[in-house]
Image: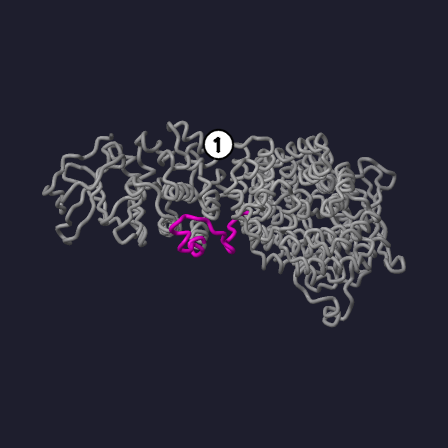
Amino acid sequence: MPNVVTTLAAGDRVGDYQILALAGSGGMGVVYRALDLKLQRTVALKFLPDELVSNESQKAQFLREARTASSLDHPNIGVIHGIEETADGRTFIVMAYYEGETLARKLMAGPLPLEHTVDIGIQMARGLAEAHSRAIVHRDIKPSNVIVTQQNVVKIVDFGLARATTNSMSTQTMSTSGTIGYMSPEQTMGKPVDQRTDIWALGIVIAEMATGRNPFQRESAPAAIVAILNEAPQLPDELPIELRGIIYHALSKDAATRYASCGEILADLETFRSHLDPVAQTTRATRTSASLRASIERASVQMLGHEARPGRKKLWLISAAAVIVAVGVLAAIPSVRNLIFGRPQQHVAVLPFENVGNDASNEAVSQGLMDTLTSRLSNLDVGQQSLWVVPASEVRRQKISDPTAARRELGATLAVKGSISRDGKDVHLTVNLIDTKNLRQIGSATLEDRAGDLASLQDEAVARLARLMHINVTAAMLHDTGGSVVPAAYEDYLSALGYMQRYDKPGNLDSALGALNKAVSTDPQFALGYAALGQAYQLKYVVDPNPKWIDEASANCKRALELDAHLPAAYVTLGRIHDDSGKYDLAAQEFQHALDLNPRDADALNGIGQSYEKANRLKEAEAAFQRAVALRNDSWDGYNALGLFYDRQGKYAQAIEQFKRASELTPDNAQVYSNLAAVYIDMSDPKVIPQAEAALMKSIQLIPSYPAYANLGILYSQEKRYQESAAATEKALQLNDKNYRVWENLAVAYERLNQQDKAANAREHELAVLEAGAKVEPKDAVLQSFLGLLYSKKGMHDEADRHLQTALALAAEDQDVLENAAEAYGRMGRQRVAVQYLNKAVARGYPMEDLRTNPAVASLLADPSFRTK
């Protein structure tokens, strides 16, 4: 035990205090009950270990921490009256004295009643929330630092002491303060900590109160640390699953997927308490809450589809970067705009440029010209909104190359066709403006620059096209290059844009990075070059999730904005960086900044809608997608994006309405029919099966695609047409074998056909895809639950439990996660907890008809404690 003051006895005087009795002792010092002779009140005096304050720097740090903690004023935080010294220099803290006992002493008698556990947990969360709001982190939350008064009021004590302690038995070093058994994973590794470390410890304390045992209790301190870092918390099956979910969420080993604040865990604890009935309180029986708030962090999954069971599995056709196509912000519908501005809105599509002579060195430049010309035309008319320029990404995604297809697929009234040729430095650029309705050429421009200044050529091309569209052009409208630019740098920039359009091809992204680094080296003031370099590094992170690419992306975007603070592209990339990091509110701020600069920036609106959705700000997300539709109510892609959003939210009627509008605008659009079918399938209503099959057949007739075949396989599985299901799913996998959900569907089909060898082969492929996916997207709750389920099938119960608990920590209310957990725990012989999860899955909307077709849960459905409502 540390060297502390132990010689004081009742009646002794310490300054203005008279000792009444020894109140307790431990690693953090000795505590005496004393009388404050000046104020005539009972106080607690805590004398600290000598080694804590013998070193001047440590003493100074301790005093700073203690003074900060003394500013806290909350009913659930122990009051610190002051910090004083004895005549011989011994430091002690003067604290309020509370009649009661520590939580540690209460737990010596065993676990607490459930209602007491939750009440103490709530009070602790309130006290910690107050401390965290003042940027104060306790770092050593444990039962011995919690006093429960005779009036059952919780007082958290010893704020500010954990960082300073050096007791190797109870705590770690200065940099890794905390008590083993209650330390978060980041604490055990000496990493920086924040409020989520206290949330972890609170989760441990709640588990200990409910079960009477620390969930990471092991035979030694090293074994406990190994468990904290690698093993699932040990919780009994009798624990109510709602409380289990709260504990799992608090004990997520990745701080990023833990509760972000005490306010979040407080809300869940209060909701859980509101659903405790008298029977549950006295018998500790479970009761499924119908409205426990989902406090989860949804991660963005860059793959097609998101469902997982026969009848619950749908696949959406999404763009190459796995994002929704949604463009623009709120504006009056076209008919209203026509009345205001006196002329119809023009929809312009810039088509791919022709590389005259097929000069290989010119190919990337011609691709980049399409993007930059689209961008410059978009900048012409932001204020008047009489011009709509279709994003180059959309033209390229749909492989539109002629004016007729541009009108049919994109609703374009005008198309720009162009060509580029080169003879040495001499560059020839031709642009033609075409009426897509009658294919009449409205006008053209042939331009030449003997010095190869493509930026100047584009300025002139934009000016000519603007005049043909009766738009007055100013110098400010042409400001797109981030200031003047060296011609060679701009050419490298154009080449890089061309490579980035197909960044999925091996070598292209590295070529783009090489060209852009060369461009900014040639012209260090080239703002757009730095912005594009930031985007290229962000794309590099998409294909190779190494944090160093994010650092490079951020640094280059910030350099671009230092040179020119009015570049929407740089803010969009910063938004994507925050989105990749799960900082959805920050991402939304960056996207909004881009929209402030250009209210019709396609990438910005797309980004802000998705960020709001991922942050569970669903009303704002819906408004963003609706704004895109309001801006372009004669273009299919806005309706498609809104339909996808509604489908993800389970608003199937609204989703179907949007997809039908999109199909009316583009009756030969295979993607829309596949998405429409996915909604019908997701409804799990036998009455709409014929509509789903008809839509899928129409989609495949137009363009045989991976999502359409995958959805057809799901549909046939729903109808128990397993041979046809397997055949359709095999066709899907021939086109894309990187989606674990499709391998799952194939395995299920073969299991139903009793073709076990083929089913086992599909499962092995599924496991490989799942394990790879978990490394890239560890926050994908459904993926984690499938991985847990698959491990349970292989008899690897510890691995199964670890992944299932991760999934439940991420998304404790997700019906598919719950159903997977139910099946997995059933397979592991944990019938009681399996039925609890199944009850909760059904309460969250999991269809009974899907459960009845799954033999693996038959015993759970027959269990007396299973409820269908």
Query: Residue 201: horizontal and vertical position, in percent?
Result: 39, 41
Residue 279 falls inside the magenta stretch = yes
In-image side of 571 versus 637 (left or right): left
Q: Is residue 754 above or below residue 718?
A: above
Residue pictured at 68% horizontal, 46% vertical:
313
- The total of numbered circles placed on residues is 1
Q: What is the basis of the colouring in this image?
A: one colour
Residue pictured at 63% horizontal, 55% vertical:
650
Q: Which residues are magenta?
A: 272-297
Within-10-Å neighbours for mark 1: few <14, some 14–19, many 20+: few
Query: Residue 825: horizontal and vertical position, in percent?
Result: 54, 39
Q: Quadrant of the C terminus?
A: bottom right
- Which residue sits furthest bottom? 339
In-image side of 484 versus 805 (left or right): right
**Magenta stretch, main secondary structure class:** loop
- Residue 473 or 190: which is nearer the viewer? 190
Whether residue 397 is visible here, answered yes or no, is yes
- Residue 84 or 817: which is nearer the viewer? 817
Where is residue 595, by image quadrant? Answer: bottom right
In-image side of 511 versus 524 (left or right): right
Q: Is residue 173 above or below residue 33?
A: above
Query: Residue 496: horizontal and vertical position, in percent?
Result: 72, 39
- Residue 648 or 352: which is nearer the viewer? 648
Query: Residue 312: horizontal and vertical position, in percent?
Result: 66, 48
Q: Amino acid at mark 1?
A: Asn
- Residue 46 or 864: which is nearer the viewer? 864
The residue at which mark 1 appears reads as: 230
Residue 700 falls inside the magenta stretch = no
Residue pictured at 50% horizontal, 39% vertical:
254
